[in-house]
Amino acid sequence: MRNSMYLLCVILLSMFFMNACNEQAPETNTGTKEVPVKSPEEMIKEGERLVASHDCEICHSPKRLGPQGPEIIPELRFSGHPSTSTLPPTNDAALKSGWVLFAPDFTSVIGPWGQSYAGNISSDSTGIGMWTEEQFKKVLREGKFKGLDNTRPILPPMPWQAFQHMTDDEISAIFAYLKSTKPVKNVVPQAKINAPPPPVKS
């Protein structure tokens, strides 16, 4: 009888430990939150929202003057300063006194640095159609012209510093959206950069 009770206890303990080993360990909170991966369509939609919220079209889309001021030309969206555009004469006296002059459609600006033109950021090959995403990131993070090393800095009024702290996902979304836009062929004129002023003598 004593042997039977001992055997029964051994069997019950064995079953208990086998069951405990088969149970999954409780999930622990590691402090990391899994972020769902967005589909290409969701990325484009998010990029469209970011482009609109940062008013990229104010400078990068040509406009015509309407009753209420400049109106974006839909078929030229994101194509930058038109290569065929003729700008009005500038007021040199105003520039010398410290003014900065914007073209009527805001795609060109003249200031102490020279004259800059808004780039073509449509999906055409004359825009960002041939760019890599890394180039695009370098433009927004480092202010490099066309996102290439050993190139000049991006000129004002492009506020690339405001994009520096965007997440990789946000920049990827903007890039995805711009690459999905209608391609508009337009070779933007080269910027006219003033020579730096001579160093101040001590």
Image (cartoon, rainbow, N blue to C red):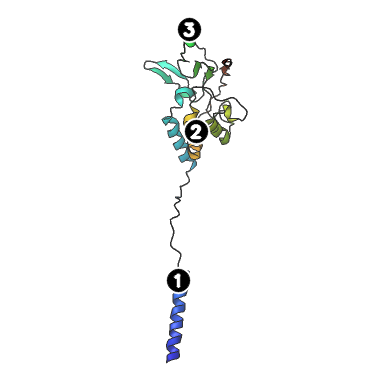
Amino acid beneath label 2 = Gln
Question: Does residue 42 appear left or right of residue 151 in this picture?
Answer: left
Amino acid beneath label 1 = Ala
Residue 102 in view here:
no
Residue 14 in view here:
yes
Residue 157 vertical placement versus 1 (above, below):
above
The CA span between labels 3 and 1 is: 87 Å
Circle number at residue 93: 3
| Residue in front for this viewpoint, 18 or 100 | 100
- Residue matched to label 2: 164
**Residue count near mark 2 (Cα–Cα under 10 Å), binned few <14, some 14–19, many ≥20:** some
Label 3 vs 1, first from the N-terminus: 1
Residue 54 vertical placement versus 37 (above, below):
above
- Residue 124 in the image, given as x and y percentages of width and height: 56, 28
For image coordinates 56% across by 36% down, the residue present is: 133
The CA span between labels 3 and 2 is: 35 Å
- Residue 135 in the image, given as x and y percentages of width and height: 57, 33
Label 3 vs 2, first from the N-terminus: 3
**Residue count near mark 1 (Cα–Cα under 10 Å), binned few <14, some 14–19, many ≥20:** few
Circle number at residue 188: none
Amino acid beneath label 3 = Ala
- Residue matched to label 1: 20
